[in-house]
């Protein structure tokens, strides 16, 4: 049974479409199977833009790209997760039931229980703190935690761990299945496209072609800085198909990853491939944006189209290793930092289409202090 402590916890709560309020909740005292996280930072992504406008599952605490420090850990939870108070962890958004067919097959991100932090659990469900835009966050059984080193800045960790985890899975065997020396086209230079650029080079891609719009100049420059071999303007004088044909000497790409959110890009993606190529598509995600694919072209050229969604648990550790090894390259790409009371402004920065806003994070009160304390007194010395 959950009990509560006396001191309150500030959280950014979605109370209605486009309406976020700062509210106070009791700090939970956890049981043997759960834990309490002091949130250091929470990344904001395009999904938050959609969720802020959604009238369902409200009120709820927002935030699903979460990094923080464990302050209270139940005995059974500590054994299950292999963690202790003071450990720095990244939190996977989905809460797996562990018993459905998807969970048993390693696809917990599509668990039939469909429970996710910051997404669909309201504050009416005790203990209310089911999102990362808060000072503290409740961690339920079924949560996936990944330990992160103390010397990775919290804002960098929160900003890039989740996109990197997705990219590891989406370019792996169940997604694009990118192989060494192959050419990949990445449609969309947002945080997910940039993460995929980094992962593609790590997988040994021969050529990475990153595609964006004129307004994406800063993001395309960031892509070149972290490994893109070529960048292409989708709204430039040359069509994307013609540019890919020119850059590949007519051979076209082996793989395409579509993270653009664009219906135009979704329909175009198969046309950028050579025979027996693969499209891994993470967008569009709304049924109202469904598109007609060039099916005849796909049949005659034996094109594989693979939908991808979130990431499996096996992607977490490789993503953590990539994050740790690339802090110096990723830290400059955290371009906007907001306080908890400014959560709506943080989402505005993502939704405005401002190319300078590469990755946006929210920093709850106390998170920075916890980070400084941990760096001064690493867990091994406490």
Image (tube, helix red, strand yellow):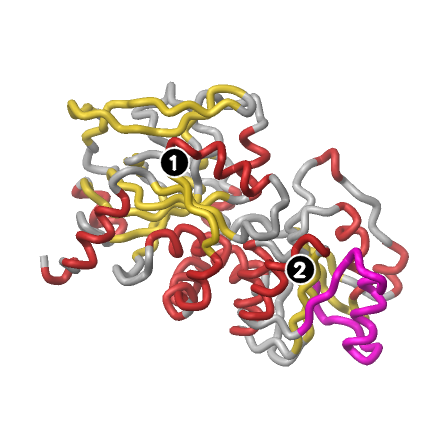
Which range is magenta?
230-257
The answer to which quarter of the image holds residue 59 is top left
Query: Which dot marks residue 257?
Result: 2
Question: Residue, x 48% and y 32% (percent of image)?
Answer: 344
323 magenta-colored: no
Residue 68 screen position, x and y as percent: 30, 47
Q: Nearer the viewer, mark 2 or mark 1?
A: 1
Circle 2 sits in a helix, a strand or a loop, which is it? strand
Q: Is residue 322 above or below residue 356?
A: below
Note whether 237 is above or below 127 in the view shown.
Answer: below
The residue tagged 1 is: 133
- Which one is nearer the viewer's eye here, 226 or 356? 356
Query: Can see residue 65?
Result: yes
Query: SS for tag 1?
Result: loop
Where does the image place residue 118, in percent across and percent down from the top left? 44, 34
Residue appearing at x 55%, y 25% in the figure: 18
Nearer to the camera, 35 or 350: 350
Which residue occupies 59% across, 39% down? 351
Q: State yes or no: discs 2 and 1 in contact (Cβ < 8 Å).
A: no
Inter-mark Cα distance, 2 to 1: 30 Å
296 with respect to 333 (left or right): right
The percent position of residue 134, horizontal first and vertical second, equals 34, 34
């Amino acid at each position: 049974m959950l009990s509560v402590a006396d001191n309150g916890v500030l959280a950014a709560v979605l109370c209605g479409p486009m309406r976020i309020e700062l509210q106070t909740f009791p700090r939970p005292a956890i049981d043997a199977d759960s834990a309490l996280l002091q949130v250091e930072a929470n990344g904001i992504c395009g999904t938050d833009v959609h969720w802020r406008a959604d009238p369902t599952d409200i009120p709820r605490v927002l935030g699903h790209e979460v990094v923080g420090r464990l302050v209270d850990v139940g005995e059974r939870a500590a054994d299950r997760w292999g963690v202790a108070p003071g450990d720095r962890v990244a939190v996977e958004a989905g809460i797996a039931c562990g018993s459905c067919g998807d969970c048993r097959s390693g696809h917990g991100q599509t668990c039939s229980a469909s429970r996710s932090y910051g997404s669909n659990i309201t504050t009416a469900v005790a203990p209310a703190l089911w999102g990362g835009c808060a000072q503290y966050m409740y961690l339920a059984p079924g949560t996936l935690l990944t330990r992160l080193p103390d010397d990775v800045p919290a804002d960098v960790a929160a900003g890039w761990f989740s996109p990197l985890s997705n990219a590891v899975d989406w370019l792996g065997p169940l997604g694009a299945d990118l192989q060494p020396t192959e050419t990949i086209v990445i449609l969309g230079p947002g945080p997910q496209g940039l993460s995929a650029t980094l992962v593609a080079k790590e997988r040994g891609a021969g050529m990475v072609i990153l595609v964006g719009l004129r307004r994406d100049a800063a993001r395309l420059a960031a892509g070149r800085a972290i490994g893109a071999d070529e960048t292409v303007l989708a709204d430039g004088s040359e069509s994307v198909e013609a540019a890919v044909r020119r850059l590949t000497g007519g051979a076209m790409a082996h793989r395409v990853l579509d993270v653009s959110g664009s219906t135009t890009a979704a329909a175009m993606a198969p046309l950028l491939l050579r025979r027996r190529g693969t499209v891994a598509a993470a967008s569009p995600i709304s049924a109202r944006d469904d598109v007609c694919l060039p099916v005849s072209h796909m049949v005659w050229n034996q094109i594989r189209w693979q939908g991808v969604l979130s990431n499996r648990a096996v992607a977490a550790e490789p993503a953590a290793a990539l994050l740790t090894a690339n802090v110096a390259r990723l830290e400059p790409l955290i371009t906007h930092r907001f306080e908890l009371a400014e959560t709506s402004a943080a989402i505005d920065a993502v939704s405005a289409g401002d190319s300078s806003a590469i990755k946006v994070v929210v920093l709850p009160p106390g998170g920075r202090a916890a980070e400084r304390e941990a760096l001064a007194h690493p867990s091994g010395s406490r």
